[in-house]
Image (cartoon, coloured by chain):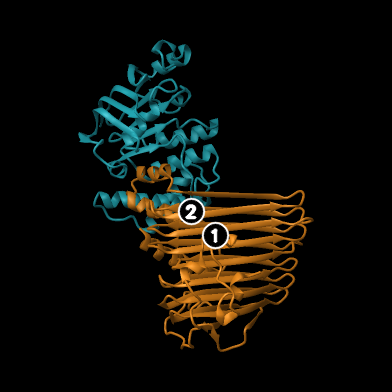
Amino acid sequence: MNALSKAASWMGGAALPNRRDESFRWSDVARALRAVPPHSPPALEPGWPGPFEGLADRELVFVNGFEAGPDLALLANEVVAVRFISDAHDTGHLSRLKVQVIAGCKAVLLESYEGRGDHYFANTLLDIELGVGASLERVVVMDEPDGAVSVSTAEVRLAERSTYAQTVAASGAKLQRHETHLHHPGGGAKARLDAVYLLDAARHADVTTVVVHEGLGGETSQLAKGVVGGSARGVFQGKIVVSHGADKTDARMRHDALLLSDKAEVDAKPELEIYADDVACAHGNTVGALDEEALFYARSRGIPLLAARAMLTQAFVAEAVERIEHEGAREALRGWAGRRLEALS
Amino acid sequence: MLSVKNLHATVGGKAILKGLTLDVPAGEVHAIMGPNGAGKSTLSYVLTGRDGYEVTQGSAALDGENLLALAPDERAAKGVFLSFQYPLEIPGVPALTFVRTAINAQRKARGEAEMGAPEFLKLARATAASLKMDFEMLRRGLNVGFSGGEKKRMEIFQMAMLSPRFLILDETDSGLDIDALKIVSEGVNAMRAPDRAMLVITHYQRLLDYIRPDKVHVLAAGRIVASGGPELALELEKSGYDRYGEAA
């Protein structure tokens, strides 16, 4: 099911996924790591604040895979921050967390991937389950050093009438991948799976999602936005499967990427597999430069070229960021995106 | 005010303007009429500096200053404004943010102080009310999901807010029903002033019933082939553009 869960020697010893694995075609973990590194030693929690400082009711902190508390987070009506911190050189570690949202409760999960050091391999596995009528908004920020290899994989299971909303913000690393497998039961359940990746230099970020609609009348909405400069590479793989019997499913996927340089690259693979009847499914995918007409329109109003570019790029990203419901998290991501875009221009 | 002399321009290597000469003095409203393909929109883009519209000969100056040497935003700061035939949708940028950014960019370019938020909002509310626009629309992404008529009204809103000196209206009447046409025309007429001039580009005479021009020019095959008073527009409405040659 998850190639990485049995990959490294400190986790069972199988081979790292490489580009011959279809799902890792554009994100060759084996090549980025060469070999499975030795296990990271324990480390103290570093002093810096996470990207969601002050927003959570409580905080779970993993450092190099070690965590003080239990590995099950039972969420009621609350905001919980989970920080996956790496402080390692040439070593690797696995973090595991189970998240359950109690039936009928409305929770927010603020998840961050933070690191210092270099050439580490952070592998993170999450198992997220929503009770009947529960709601979870998951906001993820991945900010890691240039040389890091970081792969986060989540299995998400929705229940009837539950609502799941996810926004992943990634700035890339040597190889950074965020993968979500969503089991969608239909039955009035709704899912939103958004992403923003902003990459400069030679960074690589991969956003992969697989949504399987298994029951009647489910809704999925997906909006991914990428801005890629330098010789960076963005990967978007979005797959929506509407299983036999999942009639009246409404699934919409959109991915748009802006290339800021000739050497930047975006690989996108939107997929819809439909085995049901009476479904409303659509996907759109664009990769290109800023709209010249819109640039001219802004300039003709007196906005200079650089400011017009910055405004349009920010607006391009804002479309996804503004869909975050939690105000504090939305504000945090606006700031994050503003700083990343400044670094990109 | 605006002085265009023997202007030649190409688009994608194809000659569109072929020796256009035009003078619009301050305080006047001039209409440019002509058949499709005559170069009407090209003229508006050449005057505002759009990429891909290459001037190969001639000049265009505003109050003696060469416009053609300036970037589009610099021309805007000098007071040139184009009301687009097809206004762009800009998702993620609220109309208010867009207009305030534009006003303050122009002010900065002119070495003036920024317009503060309270002053801006007061002006925006008054302007929206005069154009019978729902103020809440201005908080949404610029022109996103707007009808053709709403977009044209938004152009006039921007024009009123930016208070330019030289206005170019490119087919402003297209897509407008009669009520919207009246409101938009009132907005334009309210901007008539002794130190301001306008160029109204239109295919049909209809708009000129509401925005009365001082002069009418006929543009055909890339140059002005006839000029006259408002009666010329009425004549064209009757006889068509046929007698002005191949571009009709």
User: Which element carries disc 1, helix, strand or loop?
Assistant: loop
Which colour denotes chain A? Answer: orange
Q: CA distance from mark 2 to mark 1?
A: 19 Å
* Three-letter residue code for mark 1: Arg
Q: Is residue B140 above or below residue B49?
A: below
Frontmost residue, A193 versus A308:
A193
Judge left or right: residue A313 versus residue B222: right
Which colour denotes chain B? Answer: cyan
- Which residue corresponds to mark 1? A25
Residue at x 70% of width, y 77% of height: A102
- Which residue corresponds to mark 2? A257
Task: Give the chain letter at badge 1.
Answer: A
Residue A129 location, x and y as percent?
68, 73
Frontmost residue, B17 versus A153:
A153
Callout 2: few (<14), some (14-19), or many (20+) C-alpha neighbours within 10 Å? Answer: many
State which mark lies toward you, 2 or 1. 1
